[in-house]
């Protein structure tokens, strides 16, 4: 019998009869998925009779970037486009779904290995954290063995400062790991939200973590990935959280890189190859970075010292832009002193941190119990009285890598060529200029009837650009197209009866959109049927932001405070959302998020809700996402630029002291830097925060 090799969305492969039909959803004929259906139980709330197997939802045909929704429904739903199914989609579960006796309640986090859900174990009526693992990941060499090692390692542990693992099933179509549910906040997010901690709190938390590590080390287990984000505080000690009588407790998370070493056995069993890096570069011990198999309990102590340094200063101990740079600093530079950053650090605590971060493992504390003893002395005041005032950090004001006077007025347009070869700017002085992006050396000035430029967009290939300007007469209003190689005007797109405020170019460079003061959105395109022009009416005021989310789907924002989604095939609005930002002056789209600037900065998260990012004093003027969507830059009338973590809304960078408000922003293609276009005509390049 002739067969063909098929692969389902869960990552399973099998031989399928060539003569048999191939369904749209291969999971309906996948032997592994079918065999594991009995592990999937429908929720009593799903409307399906109990005991009937339920397959994961079958995929539909690839829709546009955002699926269609009724006008006024107030919902945007992102759909797969070129990447029809993200890796985590195979383990996505809606609230109410039951997986092997665990009812999914809500998604807590999502990462490269899968999704973590808050769930309820029905039989015992207790809350748990269910870690759904992407099946395809388990097919990689050593990964399945590593997860099993995590479970076996966790089974050795029973300590109040370590999260308990209850159960695992890695063989079904929905592989998962069930752990103790810990409500709270990890130390990374805590510092990002509230700043460096008081000395007492920092010592109190790290002391608990050291106690947990001592227990793990006594069982022959080395964690190998201690860092602030793996240390959970429960309950969360934040002002807006509910108050309880419980003292905050630290829980050590994620034993995924753990290594069990006893006189009888080494749990690696060949899982870790020589030269394989394990850990987190900001906190990994030098000997572990060189060879993860050399890590022992003292390696965890180094990482814990790095976490303590972070809690006290808000900075990692050995900062760098690359893994190599960070490791090189840890191998060559002396242990950093928290007192150098924070003057209220007791000298005895400073000495403890530096000893924990010693380059040579023999110079560190030799076991975590010694760390507990040392920190106990600090808490008893033997190292001097503990400060009670708010922490004072010796912060340094960021300075630009390079700055130039680029225009005779505000820089309102700023765009980067995708290949990092050049930067284009446009200003109130009616000039369009091309720059070498590293040293900001001017390459050319475009000549022509530009006027005061309001906005510009660069075609994805970088061969041409579009600008819009303030004009006095209707015949002059429209969009100008410029050839990047020659600097000459290629064409003008006419039709608008009012001034254009913003422009956008589609990903295939075949369509251009423009937003006008009269609330109209203009759309010009060229396809197989020839050129066409569409005028879209919906906004009740000037349109100030546009973004193509697909070649046939457009987002628009305006001073009416709404964000609209347009189906460019029909010319109709698919949805309207009130942003809560007041009159919108800028719009950006980054992966699954939409950011709008207005009276405030608000970001529409993948969950569908708009969240305010609080920090600017006054109106926000412009926004830009990093290429990977993890960072968001914003500028305001307070003459600052702020950089945010899009995941949790925490401010990770502050750039104050601009002589005039920044009017335009753009990240470099690699996301390691960004450019600012000042209201005074200054163009600057900055290093982006590392998260």
Image (spheres, rainbow, N blue to C red):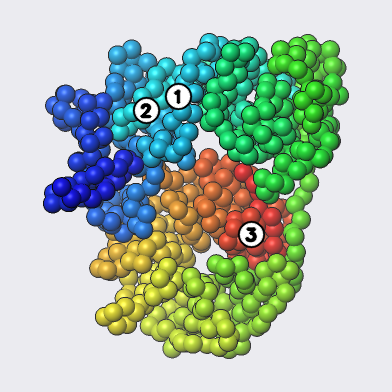
Separation of disc 3 and disc 1 at Cα?
42 Å
Residue 590 point in image, percent of width and height: 48, 55
In this figure, which residue is indicated by the disc labeled 3?
674
In this figure, which residue is indicated by the disc labeled 1?
148
- Density class for disc 2 (Cα within 10 Å; few <14, some 14-19, many ≥20) is some
Separation of disc 3 and disc 2 at Cα?
43 Å
Q: Nearer the viewer, residue 336 or 658?
A: 336
Residue at image point 43% right, 78% down: 498
Secondary structure of residue under mark 1: helix
Separation of disc 2 and disc 1 at Cα?
8 Å
Residue at image point 81% right, 35% down: 336
Q: Nearer the viewer, residue 651 or 145?
A: 145
Q: Is residue 680 above or below residue 244?
A: below
First in sequence, mark 3 or 1: give its number.
Answer: 1
Can residue 46 be seen in the rendering of this structure? no
Q: Are marks 3 and 2 in contact (CB under 8 Å)?
A: no
Q: Is residue 276 above or below residue 470?
A: above
In this figure, which residue is indicated by the disc labeled 2?
170
Residue 328 falls left or right of residue 495: right
Q: Is residue 101 above or below residue 358?
A: above
Q: Is residue 672 above or below residue 49?
A: below
First in sequence, mark 2 or 1: give its number.
Answer: 1
């Amino acid at each position: 019998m002739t067969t063909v090799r098929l692969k389902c969305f869960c990552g399973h492969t099998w031989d399928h009869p060539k003569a048999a039909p191939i369904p749209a959803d291969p999971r309906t004929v996948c032997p592994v998925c079918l065999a594991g259906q009995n592990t999937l139980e429908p929720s009593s709330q799903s409307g399906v009779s109990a005991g009937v197997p339920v397959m994961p939802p079958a995929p539909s045909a690839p829709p546009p970037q955002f699926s269609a929704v009724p006008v006024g429904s107030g919902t945007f739903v992102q759909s797969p486009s070129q990447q029809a199914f993200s890796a985590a989609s195979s383990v996505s579960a809606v609230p109410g779904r039951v997986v092997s006796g665990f009812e999914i309640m809500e998604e807590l986090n999502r990462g490269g290995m899968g999704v973590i859900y808050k769930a309820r174990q029905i039989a015992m009526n207790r809350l748990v954290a269910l870690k759904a693992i992407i099946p395809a990941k388990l097919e990689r060499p050593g990964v399945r063995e590593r997860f099993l090692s995590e479970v076996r390692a966790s089974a050795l542990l029973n300590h109040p400062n370590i999260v308990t693992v209850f159960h695992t099933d890695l063989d079904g179509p929905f592989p998962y790991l069930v752990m103790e549910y810990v409500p709270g906040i990890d130390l990374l997010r805590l510092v990002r939200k509230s700043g460096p901690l008081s000395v007492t709190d920092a010592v109190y938390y790290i002391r608990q973590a050291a106690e947990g590590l001592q227990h793990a080390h006594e069982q022959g287990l080395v964690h190998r990935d201690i860092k602030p984000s793996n240390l959970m505080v429960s309950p969360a000690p934040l002002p807006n959280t509910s108050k309880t009588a419980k003292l905050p407790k630290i829980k050590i998370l994620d034993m995924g890189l753990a290594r069990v070493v006893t006189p009888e056995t080494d749990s690696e069993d060949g899982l870790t190859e020589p030269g394989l890096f394990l850990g987190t570069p900001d906190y990994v011990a030098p000997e572990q970075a060189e060879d993860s198999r050399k890590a022992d309990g003292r390696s965890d102590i180094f990482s814990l010292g790095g976490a303590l340094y972070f809690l006290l200063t808000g900075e990692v101990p050995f900062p760098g832009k690359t893994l190599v740079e960070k490791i090189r600093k840890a191998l060559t530079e002396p242990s950093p002193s928290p007192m150098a950053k924070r003057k209220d650090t007791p000298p005895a605590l400073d000495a403890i941190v530096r000893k924990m971060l010693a380059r040579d493992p023999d110079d560190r504390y030799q076991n975590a119990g010694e760390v507990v003893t040392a920190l106990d002395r600090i808490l008893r005041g033997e190292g001097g009285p503990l400060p009670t005032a708010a922490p004072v950090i010796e912060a340094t004001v960021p300075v630009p890598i390079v700055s130039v006077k680029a225009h005779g007025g505000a820089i309102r347009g700023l765009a980067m060529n995708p290949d990092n070869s050049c930067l284009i700017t446009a200003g109130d002085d009616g000039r369009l200029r091309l720059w070498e992006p590293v040293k900001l050396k001017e390459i050319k000035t475009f000549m022509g009837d530009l006027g005061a430029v309001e906005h510009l967009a660069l075609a994805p290939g970088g061969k041409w650009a579009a600008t819009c300007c303030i004009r006095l007469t209707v015949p002059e209003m429209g969009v100008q197209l410029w050839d990047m190689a020659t600097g000459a005007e290629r064409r003008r797109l006419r039709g608008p009866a009012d001034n254009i405020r913003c422009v956008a170019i589609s990903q295939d460079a075949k369509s251009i959109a423009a937003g006008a003061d009269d609330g109209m959105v203009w759309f010009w395109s060229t396809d197989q049927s020839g050129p066409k022009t569409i005028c879209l009416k919906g906004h009740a005021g000037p349109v100030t932001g546009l973004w193509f989310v697909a070649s046939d789907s457009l987002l628009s924002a305006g001073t009416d405070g709404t964000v609209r989604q347009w189906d460019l095939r029909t010319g109709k609005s698919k949805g309207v959302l009130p942003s809560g930002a007041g009159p919108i002056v800028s719009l950006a789209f980054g992966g699954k998020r939409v950011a709008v600037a207005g009276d405030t900065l608000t970001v529409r998260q993948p969950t569908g809700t708009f969240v305010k990012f609080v920090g600017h004093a006054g109106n926000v003027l412009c926004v830009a996402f990093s290429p990977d969507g993890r960072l968001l830059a914003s500028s305001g009338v307070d003459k600052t630029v702020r950089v945010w973590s899009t995941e949790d809304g925490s401010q990770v960078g502050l750039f104050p002291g601009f002589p005039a408000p920044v009017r335009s922003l753009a990240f470099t293609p690699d996301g390691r830097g960004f450019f600012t276009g000042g209201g005074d005509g200054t163009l600057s390049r900055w290093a982006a925060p590392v998260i």
